[in-house]
Amino acid sequence: MGTFLVDYDHHDTARENAPVITQASVQTARAAKKGTGNLQVVEFILGNELFAIDLFDTREVINTTEITPLPNTPSFIKGIIDLRGVITTIIDLKEMMHITQEADGKKKARIIVLDASVSEKMIGVLVDDVLAVSTYTHEEIDRDTHASQKSDRDILGIIRKKTKTSDREKNDLIIWLDIRTMIHRVEQDL
């Protein structure tokens, strides 16, 4: 939904209180929004940590189904599924990232099916649970401290998520992953 600034035209007495959208107000709104665009992500759990990937890198989230194992593949490739007639390779993201900690409490394993723009092949990533689709401002994202420029961490940034509990405000840290780079690095094994 777009945002418009509304100026009031006080020169027309018949329309004294009627809002008028001027080109100057629209340009001002665009300029103000240009550097402060929002990021939409899919939040999920691996072990006991929170992670996110860009919403536009995902196609859908599905419940886990029976996965047919593939012989002689890396351990993080769990196998394949038939997703409405399309063979889809399933990658265990937790194993790929060497996360050994098991998730606390009840979790529902899910498969995040990646968008066709991420890889030529249909790929789904297995996660412990999907929490939400959320929108964050750039002020809530730290891209400099832990973002990987030339390392194998594949981190685009750290998102600070503020949640309110009954008695206080809590800050959770969400690791924003570069799923495109991660998949590109292992594509030859798929």
Image (cartoon, helix red, strand yellow):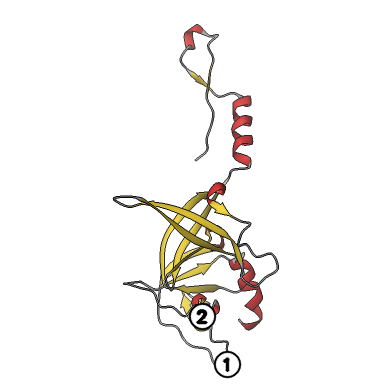
Counting residues from the N terminus, which is met first, the one under dot 1 or under dot 2?
1
Quadrant of the image containing the C terminus: bottom right
Q: Position of residue 72 (x, y in %)?
A: 57, 92
The residue sitting at 51% across, 73% down in the picture is: 124
Left or right: residue 71 compared with residue 105 = right
Residue type indicated by callout 1: Asn
Q: Are marks 1 and 2 in contact (CB under 8 Å)?
A: no
Q: Quadrant of residue 29?
A: top right
The residue nearer to you, when weighing 131 against 73, is: 131
Residue position for label 1: 72
Q: Is residue 46 above or below residue 163?
A: below
Q: Position of residue 81 (x, y in %)?
A: 47, 80
**Marks 1/2: CA distance?**
16 Å
Q: Is residue 39 above or below residue 149?
A: above
Residue position for label 2: 95
Which residue is outermost to the right? 150
Residue type indicated by callout 2: Glu
Q: What element does badge 2 sit on? A: helix
Q: Position of residue 39 (x, y in %)?
A: 54, 51
Label 2 Cα crowd, 10 Å radius (few <14 / some 14-19 / many 20+): some
Which residue is outermost to the top? 13
Label 1 Cα crowd, 10 Å radius (few <14 / some 14-19 / many 20+): few
The residue sitting at 51% across, 57% down in the picture is: 41
Q: Position of residue 38 (x, y in %)?
A: 55, 47
The residue sitting at 52% across, 35% down in the picture is: 3
